[in-house]
Image (cartoon, rainbow, N blue to C red):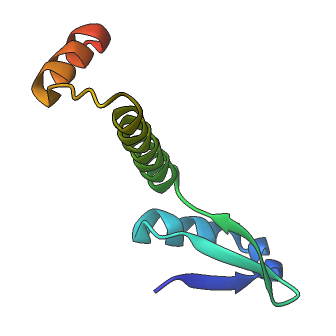
Amino acid sequence: MPKIVPIRELKNTASISKFVEESNEPVFVTKNGYGSMVIMSMEVYEREFARNQQIELINESIKEYKQSGILHDGAVFINEMKSKYGK
């Protein structure tokens, strides 16, 4: 369940920091009853950023396939990326 707090509660930074670190959930901040911002731990941010990048790459690959009709072998691609980026 997401935590929603009014902007005036940002004065208690230690409590909010503790919550986002322990729960791995974002905190939604409201201003005058409307959504204003989101606060999250670096771990959650990095996870979501990486996830979004993966989705973009998948969508680009689907678009490329629809345009060219050429399929690439997944195992070959992964091995090429491992050798290129060293992971």
- Residue 72 visible from this viewpoint: yes
Q: Is residue 82 above or below residue 40?
A: above
Residue 16 percent coordinates (x, y): 61, 71
Question: Which residue is situated farthest in the right direction here?
Answer: 32
Q: Quadrant of residue 17?
A: bottom right
Q: Is residue 70 above or below residue 3?
A: above
Q: Nearer the viewer, residue 27 or 51?
A: 51
Seen in the image, is 84 located left or right of residue 34? left
The N terminus - image quarter:
bottom left
Residue 36 percent coordinates (x, y): 79, 73
Seen in the image, is 18 located left or right of residue 47? right
Q: Is residue 36 above or below residue 3?
A: above
Question: Which residue is situated farthest in the left direction here?
Answer: 75
Identify which residue is drawn at 21% across, 21% down: 77
Identify which residue is drawn at 63% across, 67% down: 14
- Residue 15 visible from this viewpoint: no
Identify which residue is drawn at 26% across, 17% down: 81
Residue 65 percent coordinates (x, y): 33, 34
